[in-house]
Amino acid sequence: MKKHLALVLLFCSFFSFSQKFDKKITDLISNYESQVIDLRHWFHENAELSNREFKTSERIAEELRKIGLNPQTGVAKTGVVALLEGGRPGPVVALRADIDGLPVKERADITWASKMTGEYNGDVVPVMHACGHDTHTAILLGVAKVLYDIKDQIPGSVKFIFQPAEEGAPAGEDGGAELMVKEGVLKNPDVDAIFGLHIWSQISAGQVYVRPKGIMAAVNEFRIDIEGVQTHGSTPWTGVDPIVTASQMINSIQTIVSRNMPLTEAAAVVTIGSIHGGVRSNIIPESLYMLGTIRTLDNNMKDVLIQRLEKIVKNIAEANNAKAKITYQVTYPITYNDPDLYTQMLPSLQRINGVENVNSMNAITGAEDFSFFQEKIPGIYFFIGGAKKGTDPLKAAPHHTPDFYVDDSAMITGLRSMTTLALDYLKNNK
């Protein structure tokens, strides 16, 4: 009985401490909220493409130095990393924000709209933060400000990772999370767990969505090159037609998911999104190429899908007397939320945001290179709402579009969530 009473008193004491600590964190966040919003607007106005985030990384480093940290720059080309050492020994937790924009022209009617341009595939293009990475960057800087103010009370260390090129490095270049991992961002000191978030324009501000295990799909982008024999369009029998061959491949590829995948277990998608070949109506071209993407949420299904794809490409090419080659251009693993870490940290998200605001979600077939961090260490990736409260989030423009917009009011959820996850993990795992 005495032992039971002692446990109850210990729990009550811890709960009371957590409540007081949460209030202190909430007050600090409120103090910094306007600064974080101003930073968000600056990053939005100065959007830059993947591996070209020069002004962005310079401003991030400048803000980290103002806080009192000593940032490392030039990580994975344009990334920035900083380590906050707490006042007591303990584990190391990492927090990640992606920093790159997209080749999209902004149409949102805001005073801080992007007018930036950049070079993409050899062309000068408009650039905007059409996926919300400006908010992620500003949120993480805000978290750094808050945690630095209480660093003496932190049992462990926090590594802030500002990652370039989440949207994909330019052709012929390495980049993103995969390059950061190769360069040792999770080492020196060794990181024990990592947390990341993504804002979502079609969820109401204040809402959090998360799930254990696979939350976003693995991606395998591929290119199929088909070589035929060029001839006049009036005499197709004198050549080998790569266009007919490609058409047969496309139709057969679409049967992989519908006829070979156990879709009650997990979703899968294979899409041909681009086909290039031919110049005139009366010339059968010598060659063409197609671009496609595979999205899977189960590694076994991914293996089967790739095997079937390669077999279809090979056999249909042979049946048409053509030659075909398939190459893989971008490969991301499944964004996989460690189940044990999820169980441990879900109460933290619920406590700081309110149980009613933390929602379970289905996995989605979008992809994220945060998965490269999760391949090495346990990690949690989650979504926060970006639509202004009182508006219909389903009418909001989707990501990667000119009218994409997320409201400043969404920032507070990210600040609270990332700060609390870091502190609770360090306290619970010391």
Image (tube, rainbow, N blue to C red):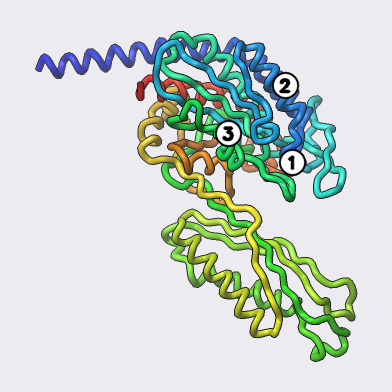
Do callouts 1 and 2 mark residues in contact (Cβ within 8 Å)? no
Residue drawn where x is 83% and y is 76% of the image? 285
Say what secondary structure mark 1 lies in.
Answer: loop
At label 3, which amino acid type do we have? Gly
- Rounded to the nearest angstrom, the CA distance separating label 3 from label 1 is 20 Å
Q: Quadrant of residue 69?
A: top right
Label at residue 159: none
Label number found at residue 102: 1
Which residue is under mark 2?
Answer: 59
Q: Is residue 206 visible?
A: yes
Residue carrying label 3: 385
Q: Nearer the viewer, mark 3 or mark 1?
A: 1
Of discs 3 and 2, which sits in the foreground? Answer: 2
Q: Is residue 398 visible?
A: no
| Cα distance between the residues tagged 1 and 2 | 19 Å
Q: SS for tag 3?
A: strand
Above or below, comparing residue 236 to residue 350 in the picture: below
**In this rendering, position of residue 177 left or right of residue 259:** right
Q: Position of residue 95 (x, y in %)?
A: 53, 28
* Rendered position, 145 above or below 265: above
- Specify which label sits upstream in the sequence, 3 or 2: 2
Nearest to the observer: residue 422 or residue 87: 87
